[in-house]
Image (tube, coloured by chain):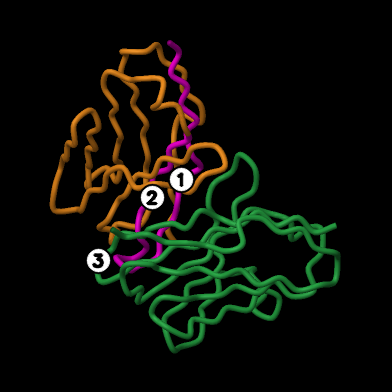
Amino acid sequence: GENVEQHPSTLSVQEGDSAVIKCTYSDSASNYFPWYKQELGKRPQLIIDIRSNVGEKKDQRIAVTLNKTAKHFSLHITETQPEDSAVYFCAANRAAGNKLTFGGGTRVLVKP
Amino acid sequence: GAVVSQHPSRVICKSGTSVKIECRSLDFQATTMFWYRQFPKQSLMLMATSNEGSKATYEQGVEKDKFLINHASLTLSTLTVTSAHPEDSSFYICSARGSAETQYFGPGTRLLVL
C-alpha cells in the first residue's frame, strides 16, 4: 500500500523566514497530493493541493512543488507569521483512488 | 461551502457502553465519508470508508463489529463504538468528499472511556 514519509517532524522558524516541509510517497499511481493545517484541538483544514499533471502551484504565501519522478512533494511557506504555527500534514491518494494516506505531520512554530 | 459537522464534540462514557458519533455534510452531498482516529501528537489513521447505501470498507486491523458504520444518506454517516473500553479513548474525525477528490473534515469528537 501507499506509504507517505514527512520531514521534519518539528520546525521552528523566525517570523518572516520561510518554512519548507518535504514528503515522499511510494505509490507511483498516486495523482493527488493535498496539504492540511491542523491547529491544536481543531479539524484539519485544506490549505493547498496539487495534482500530478502539474509541477508547481502557488496561493499567496503558500506553494507546493511536485516531482513525480522522484516521488516527492514539498510545501513552502514564505514570510511566515505567528498564525502559521500549527501541525501540517501532507497526504497522497492511494492507487489513484479516493483514500488518502497521511504523513506523520510537521509541528511548525513561528517565533515572533 | 463544504462544511462538515460532527456531533457530539466530546463524550465521556463508562466502559462497556456504546457511543454513536454523527458526521454530516451540511452544504454538499457526500458520496463518500471517511472515519479517522487520531492519537495525541500523531497523524490521522484511516479506520474505514463508507459509501452511501453500501457497506463500509475497513482498514486492516480495524474491527468492523467494534466500530459500526452506517451511511444511510448522502449527508449523514454514523460511527458507533460498541462496548467501549479505555483503549478506545481517542479523537475521532470524519471527512466527506463529493464529486471531487477533496476531503473536508469535521471538527472531531473526543471520546473518553472511563
Magenta stretch, main secondary structure class = strand
The location of residue B2, given as percent across then percent down, is 32, 60
* Viewer-nearest of discs 3 and 1: 3
Residue of label 3: B100
- At 17% from the left and 36% from the top, the residue drawn is A58
Q: Is A78 left, or right, of A39 in this rendering?
A: left
- At 52% from the left and 65% from the top, the residue drawn is B35
Q: Which mark is residue B112?
A: none
Residue of label 1: A103
> Would you say residue B27 sits in the magenta stretch?
no
The location of residue B81, given as percent across then percent down, is 70, 71
Mark with earlier residue (1, 2): 2
Q: In the rendered image, which quarter contains the C terminus of chain B? A: bottom right
Query: Which chain's colour is green?
Result: B
> Would you say residue A92 sits in the magenta stretch?
yes
The location of residue A99, given as percent across then percent down, is 40, 65
